[in-house]
Image (spheres, helix red, strand yellow):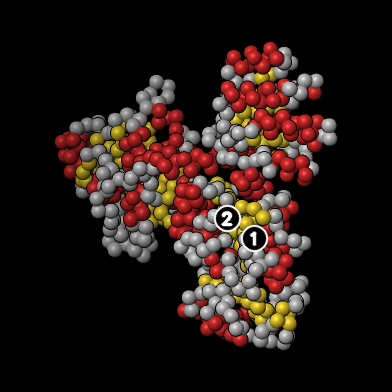
Amino acid sequence: MTDHGPTGLGAFFAPRSIAVIGASNDPGRIGGRPVDFCKAAGFAGPIYPVNPTRDEVQGLKAWPDIESIPGEVDLAVMAVPSARAAETLEACGRKGVRAVVVFSAGFSEVGAEGAAEQARLLEIARRHGMRMLGPNCLGFYSAASGACATFSTGLEGGMPRPGRIGLITQSGAYGTHLLSMAKARRLGVAGWVSTGNEADVSVADCLDHMVNSDEVGAIGLYMEGVNDVETLIRALKRARELRKPVTIMKVGASEVGARAVQSHTASLAGSDASFQAVIEQFGAVRARTTEELFDCLYAATTGPMPTGDKLGILTVSGGAGVLMADAAEAFGLQVPPMPDASVAKLLERNPFAAPRNPVDITAHALNDFDLIPEYLAEMMRAGGYDAYAAFFTSWTGSPVLGPRLRKVLLETLKGSDRPFALIGLFDEEQAVSYETEGVLTFADPSRAVQSLATMARLARGFDAAAAQGELPDVGDPVIAATGMGEAAAKARLAQAGIPALPEEVAPTAADAARIAGGMGFPVVLKIVSPQIAHKTEVGGVALNLPDAASVEAEAARMLRDIPAKVPGAVIEGVLVSSMAGEGVELIVGTHRDPSMGPMVMVGLGGILAEVLKDVALARAPVTVAEALAMLSRLRGAPLLDGVRGRPGVDKHAVAEVIARLSVLAAANAGTIESIEINPLLARPDGAVALDALILPVKGADNG
């Protein structure tokens, strides 16, 4: 892999020379494996074993230390005890080594003392301008260069099949399992890397490098945490631009962030949900299982990408057809019927068929084999499908039927640019014979359909990037790092173009009655206090008050009773506002996720927000187009279009609020913990904030 991209990892994946420090003559030992693997993989440059006790290692001249090597060294592999790591790294720096892989363990993974030693290694590497992979890592493998700076058992018995898949993992042992699985599944691997403690080079750095490498066509990641979100997002954006599939398997789902208590948004936007939203927002997909990860990588590097989500199903089994149709619905694919004229044509040809979609030829194809290409050709001509799944059970591997089936399928598919998944039983030779022609092979119909659905989801993500638009102008986006209750928060949001109803804070009950009289009845009263986020829980909201007397009585009650319910709360008065009218209540909020940064959320609002948890998330900032896409993902989205005779709401106005709030969140990510509008009333003629709250980052409050 050449040195593309800003992370500059070319010296790892395409080194001109490699030194193995702590090299062993035993190819089974940690220090012996990189030498043995590099020789087996055909690394073309010099390999310099460094071992002060030997003149020769595995048939190569050995050197007493790295500085005695006469030529330049691009990459050094350190297989030394942790106690010698710092001095060895210093020697690499003096030698002018560009990249170092540190196998040594006993650093941040073992506690504070180890973390301090790891920080020392990073300081040495940066002082000498070296990139460092590890410590406590299994290293990497590059097919193009033959560089095998690893002791992983995944390379035992031979190198993986060359190909266009990149694998990146934070786990060493599970990373080895992934590499071994890739070999067992005959997947073509361009490169594999295990990042260990990520003192310097992170998963995100490796992703950035592979995205920008012409040798990699699809990338799979196994992650346990996000250490560099900005690089991760930059790499995902670039992958989306290049239409390069990225599949991520992330473990360790966390509720960090969901335990923040004052904001609904914080409890609805946990870290794992935020991670999921971010990878979807930037065009990647998430695999829940290892099998799903490899199915996606296999499909992405074998056949073409679909251009939509309409699936055509061809089968010789009605049961398999129903199974695949069910799977299509579960995974988000449409199964539209064939045109009536085509159905009639196919029935005339074969009265035993059920040719609507799924298109069931039935076993009658055994008597009339020409039905197979005729039915498939008609589906391709008239069906308008974006992808195909075809079930032929054991026919695919039959010595009698298999060759005939392959011939008619490939002849019919010639020139097609749509993915085709063939489900049946295959031996390795039979599967490869289809895969070399771009046909996917599966034994499990559901996995075939899921893989096609994943490809369709990736393609949608790539296409969506082209229509994002511009961010809205919110004026000066900086918000004072101070807690703001409803009145102050809505006033500040109004400056950013987020509308609210006419309102005024009344310090006394008499003032509330006077203000209400001037505003016109009915009105709403709400307690005003930065310390009270959930007003209804303390009796701090009164709706539809019809006259001055009721306003004064309710205001007096709030000002008298609530201070006793919330000791220490600063009561600024009561907020008098006109009634908002009919509409759909939403919650729109932002939250500073500890891993993913500023997030924006929208969902069904009011008191139902935390009950229904029907929310859509994205990393801030978002455009109006992206905000509209968030609204479309809500399960309650039909409410916005109008139901049971009620009019639809102005979704564009709601999207404007989401986008503007997101711009504020991104601009104040270091000082504002959350901004929340709950509820935002979406109406046919716009949207207004009925309640709002702004919370500073703990310790940043300067109010």
Q: Residue at x 70, y 81 (%)?
A: 61
- Relative side of 686 to 326, left or right: left
| Residue 650, image x, y percentages | 33, 32
Q: Which of marks 2 and 1 is nearer the N terminus?
A: 1
Whether tag 2 and tag 1 are in contact, CB under 8 A, the answer is yes
Q: Is residue 348 above or below residue 493?
A: above
Task: Count the marks.
Answer: 2
Q: Can you identify the residue that label 1 sits on?
A: 143
Q: In which quarter of the image is residue 569?
A: bottom left
Mark 2: secondary structure: loop
What kind of residue is marked 1? Ala
Cα distance between the residues tagged 2 and 1: 9 Å
Q: Can you identify the residue that label 2 sits on?
A: 215
Q: Which of 91 and 358 is in front in this view?
A: 91
In this rendering, does residue 222 appear at all? no
| Residue 120, image x, y percentages | 52, 79
